Image (cartoon, rainbow, N blue to C red):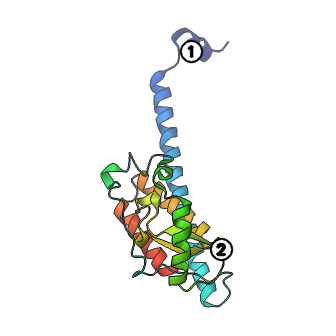
Amino acid sequence: MGAWQANHLRNGPDWTLVRSTVKRHAERVRKTRRRIADLLVLCAIAGVVAYAVLERQGRAPVASVRADPVRTPGALNPDVMQASIGETICVRGWTATVRPPTSYTSELKRQQMVEYGETGPPSAYQEDHLISLELGGAPADPRNLWPEPYPRASTVDQIENALNDKVCSGQLSLADAQRQEAALKHSYG
């Protein structure tokens, strides 16, 4: 048995060293998570921009429906504020508690598809929130819902999740995230 091992067995671990090692590791994990969240947001935005360029060149696979600022200006859930994100949007599963029933959103989607001039099958669209539930959007307010085509809707879901991560980690304010999301959907769909 070596001197270090004998000392360790006799005196126990050096808790100061253990705590400092754990703190350094935890900080590295936090920094890595922040970098991953930033990278996800950048990748998602790059994907949106690439899709918009392809669409303008006539090579996008599905026509992009942009949220109309008049028909769909967005609406906020009054229960979600910067001070309440720890009890609302940053709680895993919270959005399921406020999501409107599909019977409501399916009927609204059919109505709004007519208003937006969309003639495809309703199954090719998601009735999406302009300000997502993950960022405190009003769940059932028609001013916050619009028919977004697939696969674009799936791409935007990733952006919404990345913005939620940034808000919940304190990297972005709730209001800034809501503005970014609305600008993205009004500009690129």
Q: Secondary structure at mark 2?
A: helix
Q: Residues within 10 Å of mark 2 (few under 14, many from 20)?
A: few
Q: Residues within 10 Å of mark 1 (few under 14, many from 20)?
A: few
**In the image, which disc is placed on residue 79?**
none
| Residue 157 in the image, given as x and y percentages of width and height | 56, 64
Q: Residue at x 44, y 63 (%)?
A: 140
| Residue 110 in the image, given as x and y percentages of width and height | 56, 75
Amino acid type at image mark 1: His
Q: Secondary structure at mark 1?
A: helix
| Residue 64 in the image, given as x and y percentages of width and height | 58, 81
| Count of all numbered marks drawn on residues in the image | 2
Residue holding disc 1: 8
| Residue 25 seen anywhere in this rendered image of the structure | yes
In the displayed structure, would residue 34 be above or below residue 123? above
| Residue 57 in the image, given as x and y percentages of width and height | 63, 91
Amino acid type at image mark 2: Ala
Q: Quadrant of residue 71?
A: bottom left
Q: Quadrant of residue 62?
A: bottom right
Q: Earlier in the sequence, mark 2 or mark 1?
A: 1
Q: Nearer the viewer, mark 2 or mark 1?
A: 2
Residue holding disc 2: 124
| Residue 42 seen anywhere in this rendered image of the structure | no
Q: CA distance from mark 2 to mark 1?
A: 65 Å
**Toward the viewer: 158 or 112?**
112
**Toward the viewer: 123 or 25?**
123
Q: Quadrant of residue 50?
A: bottom right
In the displayed structure, would residue 63 be above or below residue 133? below
**Toward the viewer: 78 or 1?**
78
Q: Residue at x 65, y 71 (%)?
A: 123
